[in-house]
Image: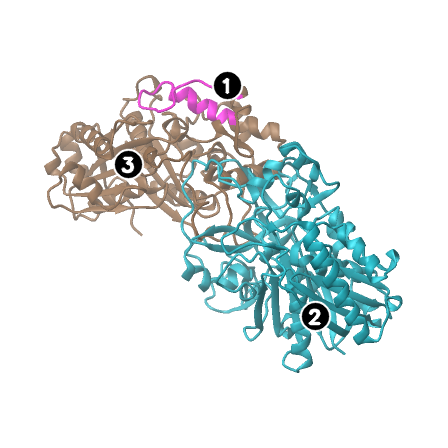
Chain colours: A cyan, B brown
Amino acid sequence: MIGITSYGAYIPWHRMDRQLCLKAWGGFAIPGERSVAYYDEDSLTMAVESAINCLQDFDPEKVDGLFFATTTSPYKEKECAATMAIPLNLRRETRTADFNTSLRCATTAILMAYDSIKAGSLNNVLVTAADIRLASPSGMQEQGLGDGGAAFLLGNKNVIAEIIASHTISDDLAANWRADSDTFLRAWEDRMTQDEGYSKILPETVAALLEKAELTTKDLAKAVFDPPGDPRGHAKAVKDMGLEPGQVEDPYKLFMTVGLTGCAMAPMMLAHALEDAKPGDKILFAGYGNGCNAFIFQITDAITKLPERKGISKYLANKNPMEKYNDYLRWRKIIQLEAARRQEQQPIRVSAIWRERKQLMGLWGVKCNKCGTPQYDNGCGTTTPIRVCAKCIAQDDFEDYCFSALKAKVFSFTNDQLAPSIDPPSSVVLIEFEGGGRAFFDLTDRVADEIKIGMDIEMTFRKVFESRGISNYFWKARPAR
Amino acid sequence: MGSIKDRVAIVGMGCTKFGTLWDKGPTDLIVEAVNEACEDAGIGLDEIEAGWVGTMFGTGGRSVSEALRMQYIPFTRVENACASGIEALRGAAYAVAAGIYDICLAVGFDKLKDEGTSGLPGNENRTNTMYKSSMPGSFAMMANKYFERYGLSMKEGKEMLAKISVKSHDNGVLNPKAHLRKKITVEKVMNAPIIASPLGLFDCCGVSDGAAAAIVTTPEIAKKLKGDQVVYFKALQISTSPTTGRVLTDYDYTHVEESYRAGIAAYKEAGITNPREEISMAEVHDCFSITEAVTMEDLQFSKRGKVKEDIDNGTFRLDGKLPVQPDGGLKCFGHPIGASGIRMCYEMYLQLLGKAGERQIKNPALGLCHNQGYEPFAPTVSICIVGL
């Protein structure tokens, strides 16, 4: 039996009421709100958090494949999955790959994971998907898009959702696209792309899939597939496929709260549907984009034993309304803002971040074998790597000790108005980890006035700055939620 | 272990006016400070045998030898962040104490206002610093922790700190060489814009250009040059952090261990057993008001957690029992990094020789300078005690 063995998701904390777009630009506001990744988030960080949730009860050493699907890779050349493997504590031998450019690349990654397991090449493949697509300011697409991610672990043991059939159609229609040089999304006229694309290809793929699986729509407990750019096209497809509305994972649940999350949309809808799935359910799952990938999942008894996790529902409930549309422009660096009158960011040193990758991106410190003191040092230069115990001065007698999953408390803090920040003030905390060890971190996803000594903290993987085209990732503290 | 006590004398000192000296280059500052020091000592530049230079943004010993066209004698730049000034004094004094040279020069300078930044250039944009806190931010965290630990409300804490700045400004007004010479009120300090919470604008020292210099020599030569107008080193101690405060949970962030330890070492070297009673006056590293507050406790002038009582009682005011920052401190002088340690010593020197004018403290015997580099959890602290 091969299929999904665990799942996770991520939605940024910040949500923008679409009325803010109306206030900024005039025109018309789509009802509801959209998620906006914070200035320190990108597709890679959102995929990492989804993956951390997905792997919460799984030994990362057992993962042998990591696929990252996104249409918004921070790089044209450089793999993101190889970066993600470090905060996820995956082995070097893990087969890593990025899947890009199509909105159905996440479902393609799931297919490839399935095939790799079926072929016996891999046993546990983590498929992550996240997108942070940009539409030009002032348009409807800007309101309609959202940011988020999802992750699935595929394997052949403890399967909760078995893949019993799949079908693919490839199609070249450029419904929406971004050229190599484009920052913002482009799209062809909706009517044509829906008539000849989504509304045709999706039902065609599903019909072929059901035939292959010798099923009819009546056999389906749930149908989960992403809506097109104009989400109203989803209802037409439901009707054309002969599905009853009660059978369908309603795309408006996410569209009204998060927006269209690109290649992560179908995976996020599936992650949401899995929260309520019952053993025996057959779930149709499809992802559209330059064709369509469709699957039938059979839910197993194992789903009842899957421990609780931060799924879509918890992230949906956990949110902070944005006050200003301008913050969106600022966070996405859509406009150039006045620079702080401070020293400019020193350029990144690739050699140094490569050398310290485990300590920085993995948040690994050490625990002294002599005195047992856990210690983490995020550098500032001369104290890394740790060669001498800060407590008992023993040299080179440590075991590796990972801080990324530990809870912590604020020991002291400041809201710094002088240090440059994309969302001032710069909130900085000195935190103490459960079990020992302390370090300074930026505090992200916070309300500056609510920071207190003793506040509960959890760690989150974020982008700290960009330099020389390199996205520099590290961990930040976040109020525990 | 040896001691510097009474083995080296200061025979001349100089100090420029500190400020936003847009029309002055580093050379102007160095020449002005050194000329004043030489004139005070009654020597020519050609009598100097070696020099030590404390600067953060200048480079090499050459920064001073070049400015003064010193002729092929050794000049060494020393740098210990904000504590570089006393580091330069220590180099010069130790060279004389070692018997290698008879007359040495120590110079501290920085041309901070050419950096083009607001506030002290900080760590937050260094590529290997993974969190964004400026220098005020690092000290602000000490203030928040101090308030929490000793049960001060935000208002009580801020008021305690405000009184420190008000006192320094009261002194700075009397000093023609200070940068900021304006009286301020507790209310004004408490309502000032926040730089890094809870520290506001007037909790932070100024940002200035400036230079200071000292001529040091043997007691014998000093007596020949100046008779009894001579100040002696009583202690020169430095404590450099193992930088464990941000790693281990045992650092309380309400004191500076290096200040405490350098203080103990300096008192021992100077033969001081009761600092609060024996020290006549002090210039401490008040880069931020909270730094001065905890330094009073670290130097054992105040009991732990009780500095507020001394502040409220006016202990550290010019007319108090133990005047601190009689010249206005970093608060009013600003902090051209390398210059500050020697600028502190300049004030102690003037006071000891009865040359402090309106700020003159009655019959001082021992003056303490405290110079701190880097953040509270990982600094280098230099302490220099001078006396008659």
Q: What element carries label 1?
A: loop
For the point 50% across and 43% down, the residue is: B133
Q: Is mark 3 on a helix, strand or loop?
A: strand
Image quadrant where residue A303 sits: bottom right
From this view, report whether residue B180 is shown above or below residue A285: above
From this view, report whether residue A141 is shown above or below residue B290: below
Circle 3 chain: B
Image quadrant where residue A270 sits: bottom right
Circle 1 chain: B
Q: Residues within 10 Å of mark 1 (few under 14, many from 20)?
A: some
Q: What element carries label 2?
A: strand
Q: Nearer the viewer, residue A128 or B239?
A: A128
Of the residues shown, which amino acid type is indicated by label 1? Thr
Q: How far apart are marks 3 and 1 (CA)?
A: 31 Å
For the point 65% across and 37% down, the residue is: A21
Q: Nearer the viewer, residue A319 or B368?
A: A319
Provide the residue span drawn in magenta.
B162-186
Residue A210 is situated, as x and y percent measured from the top left of the image, at 81, 71
Residue B340 is situated, as x and y percent measured from the top left of the image, at 34, 35
Say which mark, if any, is on residue A168. 2
Q: Residues within 10 Å of mark 2 (few under 14, many from 20)?
A: many
In the visual, does A316 lie left or right of A375? Answer: right
Q: Distance between the residues labelled 2 and 3?
A: 72 Å
| Residue that mark 1 sits on | B185
Circle 2 chain: A
Q: Distance between the residues labelled 1 and 2?
A: 76 Å
Of the residues shown, which amino acid type is indicated by label 3? Phe
